[in-house]
Image (cartoon, rainbow, N blue to C red):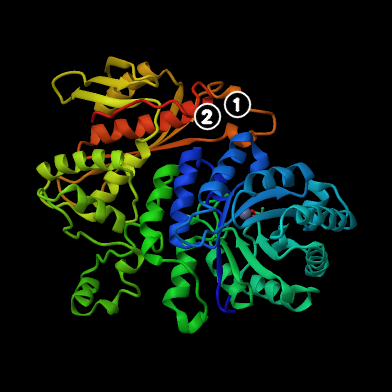
């Protein structure tokens, strides 16, 4: 690989999934991994297999299906493990099915972590690293080691630990700024020091992993790359622990937009960025802030008169990259009322969606309904239909029909008809403070899954009264409702919330679909039904 090539190590499914609020089912993880492979990432950190049997199974599926893709060179599939034998065994069990498996093991090296968290002496830490990296190497050729909290560790101690990790078989040394404490100059200096002083470093790849507590994650990562690191650990939309991780789209586009400055390159196909950002946002239920660089709704919007005037005269006055480079095709008229199923399939493929025949049939039906209501169907509309379809595919409960009456002349009332896990029909009528509230109460009566609605977010996909509405919700289980699956070690599970997404021209229907999607995840986590139970055809 050429010396200027930066490996993109995506940890959306591991560090990203550790975000407060993000929680993904095994099918969603697989879909995200498929999208990441298409985006061109070099490594997918698919999860932390020792965390739970579900995590192990999700990583195993990704290793088997995405780690062996026949179409193109598959990415490396990586599993995280503490420097504990059983963690390393679990990681290996999950990833060994991939063509290119990697075990990533970590142990803290800062004084504060060694003293208070690990209660280990520096010598014990060095011994543990030697022992466990060495053990991992007996299972797998490709080993990554991270000294956790490297940003606050003594550099001299880091050179020693990293040198021992290399001797024991580590091929990638990842330097995490675990708590997002460092500044770009400091972090760049730390990487330069490691490159210069670590014995054997010339035979390894140095990687950087930054958190965004001070809003410096991207700047720190770029400083690390400028100092010689050649792997960047990132997540889509920058999701991750606390304030999140370095965002993939910012690193990829900084490198692509400023080639003369950085003199680096990645394997990322930037036209896949917008689609991937939406997929991750919809699946995790974590919406992207409008002013977020690259993928925020306003990232390519020009509001001020002077800016609009400049843009009309010459786009480069206010645009440093075109929306098309990140796969944002604004308001294209793509298909119309008379378009056939084949044209729809081709366009969906161009947008990055590979839909099965039965999914295509359903999307086509909704596309035709939409074309009857809406004159202009844009790529954004098609993406919303595709996302919604993929989202609803393997659900326990599905919406089959819905009617509401609301206004100022009476109490808002909803009638909801749903298909249950065994295809059985349920119908309920409910009153509410508004139409969405009435619908949600009727759904609650059918699904019987106690929860608190933490967030309800509604957006129009395109401008205009006939636009598709997108709804994202976030739910939290009420105490005890997922108790069955909570083991003493899985405190993380306890604070998990569940996101749901729905899209429709009728915002009440979109709201219902989003709520049901969130409830289905919650039900899956509750263990009330096996993940395989699936209801049949969707009616709305
Ligand atoms: O932030 C961190 O230190 C991590 C390690 C496990 C690499 O996520
Ligand atoms: Zn991290």
Residue located at (38% from left, 19% from top): 422
Q: Position of residue 325 (x, y in %)?
A: 34, 69
SS at mark 1?
Answer: helix
The alpha-carbon separation of the residues under discs 1 and 2 comes to 7 Å
Label 2: state its secondary structure: helix
Residue 538 in view in this figure: yes
The front one of 443 and 143 is: 143
The image shows residue 164 at horizontal and vertical percentages of 83, 64
Front-lying residue, 159 or 534: 534
Neighbourhood count class around disc 1 (C-alpha, 10 Å): few under 14, some 14–19, many 20 upward: some
**Quadrant field for ligand 1:** bottom right
Q: Earlier in the sequence, mark 1 or mark 2?
A: 1
Q: Is residue 10 above or below residue 268?
A: above
Q: Residue furthest front?
A: 70
Above or below for 166 versus 129: below
Percent position (x, y) of residue 214? 57, 60
Q: Left or right: where does residue 347 sit relative to residue 492?
A: left
> In x, y percent, where is residue 527?
53, 24
Q: Which residue is drawn at 18% across and 57% down?
A: 334
Question: For residue 525, which numbered disc appears in the image?
Answer: 2
Indicate if the residue with disc 2 has its beta carbon within 8 Å of ligand 1. Answer: no
Examine the image and state in which quarter residue 99 appears.
Answer: bottom right
Q: Tell me if label 1 and label 2 are in contact, CB under 8 Å.
A: yes
Report the residue marked by disc 1. Answer: 485
Indicate the quadrant containing the N terminus: top left, top right, bottom left or bottom right.
bottom right
Q: Which residue is at 78% across, 76% downward?
A: 197
Note whether residue 291 is visible.
no
Query: Which image quadrant: the C terminus?
Result: top left
């Amino acid at each position: 690989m050429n010396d200027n090539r930066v490996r993109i190590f995506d940890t959306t499914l591991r560090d990203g999934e550790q975000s407060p609020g993000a929680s993904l089912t095994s099918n969603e993880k697989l879909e995200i991994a498929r999208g990441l492979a298409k985006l061109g990432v070099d490594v997918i950190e698919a999860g932390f297999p020792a965390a739970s049997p579900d995590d192990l199974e999700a990583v195993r599926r990704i290793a088997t299906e995405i780690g062996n893709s026949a179409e193109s060179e598959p990415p490396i599939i990586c599993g995280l493990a503490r420097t504990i034998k059983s963690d390393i065994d679990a990681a290996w069990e999950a990833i060994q099915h991939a063509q290119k498996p990697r075990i990533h093991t970590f142990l803290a090296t800062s004084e504060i972590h060694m003293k208070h968290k690990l209660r280990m002496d520096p010598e014990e830490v060095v011994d543990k690293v030697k022992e466990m990296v060495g053990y991992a190497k007996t299972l797998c050729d490709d080993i990554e080691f991270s000294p956790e909290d490297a940003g606050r560790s003594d550099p001299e101690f880091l050179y020693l630990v990293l040198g021992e990790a290399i001797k024991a078989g580590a091929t990638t040394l990842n330097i995490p700024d675990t708590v997002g404490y460092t500044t770009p100059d400091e972090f760049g200096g730390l990487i330069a020091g490691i490159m210069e002083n670590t014995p054997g470093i010339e035979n390894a790849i140095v990687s950087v992993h930054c958190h965004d507590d001070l809003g410096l994650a991207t700047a720190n990562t770029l400083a690390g790359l400028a100092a010689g690191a050649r792997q960047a650990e990132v997540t889509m939309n920058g999701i991750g622990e606390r304030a999140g991780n370095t965002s993939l789209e910012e690193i990829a586009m900084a490198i692509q937009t400023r080639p003369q400055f950085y003199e680096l390159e990645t394997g990322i196909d930037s036209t896949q960025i917008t689609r991937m950002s939406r997929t991750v946002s919809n699946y995790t239920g974590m919406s992207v802030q409008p002013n977020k660089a690259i993928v925020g709704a306003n990232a390519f919007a020009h509001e001020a008169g002077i800016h609009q005037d400049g843009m009309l005269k010459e786009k480069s006055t206010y645009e440093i990259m075109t929306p098309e480079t990140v796969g944002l095709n604004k308001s294209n008229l793509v298909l119309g009322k008379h378009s056939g199923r084949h044209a729809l399939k081709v366009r969906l493929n161009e947008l990055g969606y590979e839909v099965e025949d039965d999914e295509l049939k359903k999307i086509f039906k909704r596309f035709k309904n939409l074309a009857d209501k809406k004159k202009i169907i844009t790529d954004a509309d098609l993406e919303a239909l595709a996302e919604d379809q993929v989202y609803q595919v393997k659900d326990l409960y599905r919406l089959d029909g819905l009617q509401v009456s609301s206004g100022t002349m009476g109490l808002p009332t909803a009638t909801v008809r749903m298909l249950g896990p065994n295809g059985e029909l349920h119908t309920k009528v409910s009153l509410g403070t508004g139409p969405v509230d009435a619908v949600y109460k009727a759904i609650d009566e059918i699904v019987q899954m106690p929860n608190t609605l933490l967030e309800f977010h509604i957006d129009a996909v395109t401008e205009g009264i006939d636009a598709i509405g997108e709804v994202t919700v976030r739910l939290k289980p009420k105490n005890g409702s997922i108790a069955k699956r909570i083991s003493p070690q899985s405190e993380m599970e306890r604070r998990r919330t569940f996101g749901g997404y729905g899209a429709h021209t009728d915002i009440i229907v979109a709201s219902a679909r989003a709520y049901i999607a969130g409830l289905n995840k919650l039900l899956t986590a509750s263990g009330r039904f096996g993940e395989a139970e699936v209801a049949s055809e969707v009616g709305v």
